[in-house]
Image (cartoon, grey):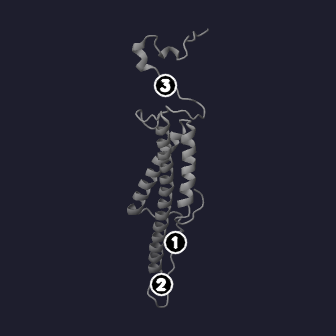
Amino acid sequence: MDMPMPTDSMGSMSGSDSSSSSSVMMMMVPYLHFTGGDFLFFKEWKPTSAGALAAASIGLALLSIFERWLFSFRRTLDGRWQDRTLASTTAHANKIKGCDTGGAAKEISFNSSIRTAMPFIPSRDIPRAALYTFQMLVMYLLMLAIMTFQGAFFISIVVGLGIGEVIFGRVGPITEGH
């Protein structure tokens, strides 16, 4: 059985009269390009002129630098929170063993399990999760801008991330991975 194919390039969704021009679907350019007219996040944000495209690119570069700052800020806070948690758990373990008196330590034998994860502390873990969520929001906004295949957006995001890493990459404790 053969299926009939639509005759026009827009398929059966487009109409032949001008009254249906508002329902015509806008097709995305599926390759890297440097022309204006792509939507950026919202329907109203559609840089078409060279100046608007440059302003959008500068804004995306600044958003990329801000994302790297968020990452370093979160990494710094994670290091501080981890140090405080380790200090409090070590002090608690020393109290149990009787080592915090300053005198001779008396040995108390007890079975303790080695902790593989930090304890849940709401005053630290909820802000940490909120900061991570906000950082991921910024990352997904950058991803959406990349997905327009607009070459200027791509270059400005990559350059912005590089500049942000140069500025903020050494801030905070060094951890393995990213």
> Is disc 1 surrounded by few (<14), some (14 to 19) or many (20+) residues within 10 Å?
few
Q: CA distance from mark 2 to mark 1?
A: 16 Å
- The kind of residue on which mark 2 rests is Cys
Q: Which residue is rendered at x = 55% and y = 40% of the image? A: 152
Does label 2 or label 1 sit earlier along the sequence?
2
Q: CA separation, marks 3 and 1? A: 64 Å
Q: Secondary structure at mark 2?
A: loop
Measured along the vertical axis of the image, is residue 7 above or below residue 145?
above
As rendered, which of 135 and 27 lies closer to the eye? Answer: 27
Dot 2 and dot 1 residues touching (CB under 8 Å): no
Residue 118 appears in the figure:
no
The answer to whether the residue labelled 3 contacts the one labelled 1, judged by CB atoms less than 8 Å apart, is no
User: Is residue 29 visible to the viewer in this orientation of the structure?
Assistant: yes
Query: Is 169 placed left or right of 73 in the picture?
Result: right
Which residue is identified by label 1? 112
Identify residue for label 2: 99
Q: Residue at x 46, y 89 (%)?
A: 102
**How crowded is the residue under tag 3: few (<14 C-alpha within 10 Å), some, or many (20+)?**
few
Instruction: Answer above or below: position of 166 versus 136.
Output: below
Distance from disc 2 to disc 3, alpha carbons, whole Å, reads 72 Å
The kind of residue on which mark 3 rests is Met
Label 3 sits on residue: 26
